[in-house]
Amino acid sequence: MVQNAVATTQLISLSRECRTLTQLKQVHAYLLKSLLPQNPSAIAPRLSVAATSSDRSFFSYARLIFNHLPFRNSFMYNTMIRGYLQANSPIPAILLYLDLLGYGFEVNKYTFSPVIKACTVLALWSMLAPARLLFDKSPERAVVMWTAMIDGHGKIRDIENARFLFEEMPQRNMIRGGTKPKESVLVTVLTAYAHLAALSQTLWIHSYVNRYNLESNTILATALVDMYCQCGYVESAISVFVGIRKRDIGAWNAMISGVALCGDVKKSIELFDQMAISGTRPTETTFVALLSASRAGMVQEAEKFIEEKMGGLGGGDANVWGDLLGACRIYEMWM
């Protein structure tokens, strides 16, 4: 027993140190030759390493291990469900959850969170409904579960339930008690409202942001810019944009896209000039926003702008030209 315990500890350590699939297979081979194959403690770390690795070849190996296990437990199921989610395979993750239920294994917060995320990724009523059922039955609801459900309802334009869930969050009650809100939660809710162009709710969120001095959060401020532009309130969007201390390409793109969406092509060009002066490089998204001027009958102006400005961006930069051509493909504006 003592030898088994020592060997198990060594295997756990070795599994965590594996950096290649070959190394992991060597540990697996050692396990099969030893007397430990029936020990869950020996198998769990190998499965966890393989299933959650950023190298997807590891995940294929994890599935092989899982499918040939003589026994399984909740931890192993949870690990594989999380692995499928990381591999952008939400449907297999949900099917594996149903398999877990069918065998009567215990479910917990580590089960519910990835399953709900898998359902909301699909953003369809047929899948969001069971996700909501899982959420309602979950004994413990982490912030990530709340935000996943809010985001899911936002994607299907169900503003009523998105707002209801936000109001019901325990973290929301903590805020009422004077605790600073989670910025990630506000970003998720605000983004959901931005998709809906729900001005009244987003004005409320903006006041919330100001109250807790969260204006310095670039992601949150960018979401506000996007929201105001979606609602047609460009001046409010510009006001928020001007207040962003560290403007990344996401913030610039949101502002340029927003004013272009509202038909102000000249303002888009002015913003592009300011972005170039700041040293921020344009992306395909930037050019898509500028080329969208064609929708407003401004094709010639957009073409003239590109001819004049590309030289100033380093005319020989293949990445910039690649982004421009990608944008042209989207709008079918080969010049």
Image (spheres, helix red, strand yellow):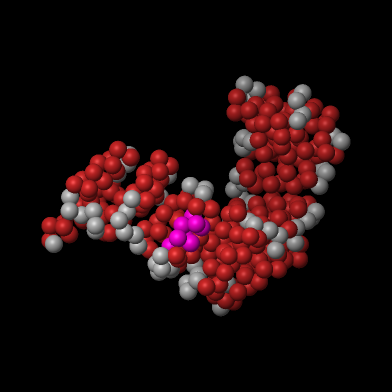
In this view, the residue in front, 239 or 187, is 187
Residue at horizontal 81 percent and vertical 47 percent from the top: 262
Residue 178's x, y, as percent? 56, 75
Residue at horizontal 70 percent and vertical 53 percent from the top: 225
Query: Taken as a whole, is the magenta stretch helix, strand or loop?
Result: helix
Residue 311's x, y, as percent? 69, 24
Instruction: Answer whether residue 126 is visible to the viewer in this image.
Output: yes
Question: As drawn, is 79 to the left or to the right of 35?
Answer: right
Residue at horizontal 80 percent and vertical 54 percent from the top: 232
Q: Residue furthest top?
A: 316
Question: As drawn, is 326 to the left or to the right of 21?
Answer: right
Question: As drawn, is 135 to the left or to the right of 58?
Answer: right
Q: Quadrant of the N terminus?
A: bottom left
In this view, the residue in front, 123 or 95, is 95
Residue at horizontal 51 percent and vertical 49 percent from the top: 89
Residue 332's x, y, as percent? 75, 30
